[in-house]
Every structure is written in C-alpha cells, then in structure tokens.
Image (spheres, helix red, strand yellow):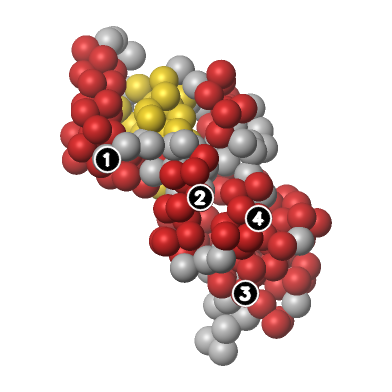
C-alpha cells in the first residue's frame, strides 16, 4: 500500500485531481468528508465549537451553520486560529485511523489522502503519507475560478486565498506537482502520467 498526500489551495483544482485519481482506481480519503463528520452534533469537536463561538453558529435543527462560521473565519484570523485548533486534532486522528485500518487490513494499491491543509499547519508525516502531490494553479486563474465558483467579489475571493499558505511555498515541499492552470484534459494527462509512475513503482 502506498499513501499519497494530495493538497493544494482553494480553487486550485485539488478536487478535480482527486476525482481523476479515484477514476483510475485510487482509494481516496477525503479530509473535507472527515471534517464534516467530526463536527456533527454530539461529537466532541461540535461541543467545543459551540462553546467557543456560541449558539448563533447553529441552524434551527442544531447542526452547525457552516456558511456563517465560514464567513467569520475568513474575515477574522483569530477566529480561524481558534476553529483550526479545535477541529484539526480530530480530523488528523480520524484520517490516521482510516490509514491504519487500511494498513491492518493488508490493503494494496494507492491510497490518496486529500487534505487541503496538509502542508499548512503540521509536518506532512503527521498524516503518515509516503509522498505529497501539490495541485497548482496560476494565481490569476485561481482567483477567477474562485470568484465564479463561489459567486464572490474580488475582495472576498482574495481574502479567502490569503487566508491559506501560498501555493508557491508548498511546491518546494512536494514530491510531484500537478499544474491545473489549463484545461481539465491537460490536468488529466498529468494525473494519468503520475498514476503510471506510482503504480509501477514498488511501495
């Protein structure tokens, strides 16, 4: 079993690359899915978030108002730091557990761990990955995609991009880089070429 960490930045195209890896046969662990699970009502992260940010961050059914919380953390660095301090430990623990379960089961093949903040907040070995892939997009392309995808103003989009570690700083720490500045077909060809290397190289 080979564990590949996949990361990038907001609107860089990481989800596109993860989807292609999945189509090619990878077992994908999605950190966003894990993040949604650990903040469900009754989970420890949920209780800590409500204690830290108050009941105004809840929907009528008691679940987190993710949009309101997201708006807060993108404009308030201190709130973002508080939220990350709460959630990241639970997300990391669950991902580590999922990898450990696969190793214990004798899983073969490629496991792709899709973690947006893989190189932002902690050493990459925190997630027990064998190698790291960074998905890159030209900054102007990244900005335009984010504005269109989220229907944001330019200022809102820039603030969200600036809330993350710059992609240019992540590239030197990557084992491989996928340039998603072009068309989906161009990106697919890069992922397919990398997949061929990964599957012919022993774990």
Q: Is residue 137 left or right of residue 60?
A: left
Q: Nearer the viewer, mark 2 or mark 3?
A: 2
Q: Is residue 118 left or right of residue 103?
A: right
Q: Nearer the viewer, mark 1 or mark 3?
A: 1
- Are the residues at dot 2 and dot 3 in contact (C-beta closer than 8 Å)? no
Residue on which disc 4 sits: 159
Residue on which disc 3 sits: 68
Q: Earlier in the sequence, mark 2 or mark 1?
A: 2
Residue on which disc 2 sits: 143
| Marks 2 and 3, how far apart at CA | 22 Å
Q: Quadrant of residue 72?
A: bottom right
| Marks 3 and 4, how far apart at CA | 16 Å
Residue 40: x and y in percent read 53, 68
Residue on which disc 1 sits: 183
| Marks 1 and 3, how far apart at CA | 33 Å
| Marks 4 and 2, how far apart at CA | 10 Å
- Are the residues at dot 4 and dot 2 in contact (C-beta closer than 8 Å)? no
Q: Where does the C terminus fall, quadrant-wise?
A: top left
Q: Is residue 135 left or right of residue 200?
A: right
Residue 155: x and y in percent read 63, 60
Q: Residue at x 41, y 20 (%)?
A: 176
Q: Residue at x 66, y 77 (%)?
A: 57
Q: Is disc 4 placed on a helix, strand or loop?
A: helix
Residue 37: x and y in percent read 48, 61
From this viewpoint, is residue 60 visible?
yes
**Outermost right residue:** 78
């Amino acid at each position: 079993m080979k564990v590949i960490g996949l990361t990038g930045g907001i609107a860089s195209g990481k989800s596109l690359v993860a989807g292609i890896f999945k189509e090619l046969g990878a077992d994908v662990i999605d950190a966003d899915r894990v993040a949604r699970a650990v903040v469900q009502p009754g989970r420890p992260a949920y209780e800590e978030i409500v204690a830290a940010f108050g009941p105004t961050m809840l929907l009528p059914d008691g679940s987190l108002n993710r949009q309101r919380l997201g708006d807060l953390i993108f404009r308030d660095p201190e709130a973002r730091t508080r939220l990350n301090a709460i959630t990241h430990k639970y997300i990391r623990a669950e991902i580590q557990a999922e990898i450990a379960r696969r190793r214990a089961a004798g899983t073969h093949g490629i496991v792709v761990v899709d973690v947006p903040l893989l190189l932002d907040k902690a050493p990459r070995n925190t997630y027990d990955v064998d190698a790291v892939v960074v998905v890159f997009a030209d900054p102007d392309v990244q900005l335009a995609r984010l504005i269109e995808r989220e229907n944001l103003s330019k200022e809102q989009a820039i603030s969200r991009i600036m809330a993350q570690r710059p992609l240019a700083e992540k590239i030197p720490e990557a084992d491989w880089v996928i340039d998603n500045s072009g068309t989906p077909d161009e990106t697919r060809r890069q992922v397919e070429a990398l997949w061929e290397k990964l599957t012919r190289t022993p774990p």
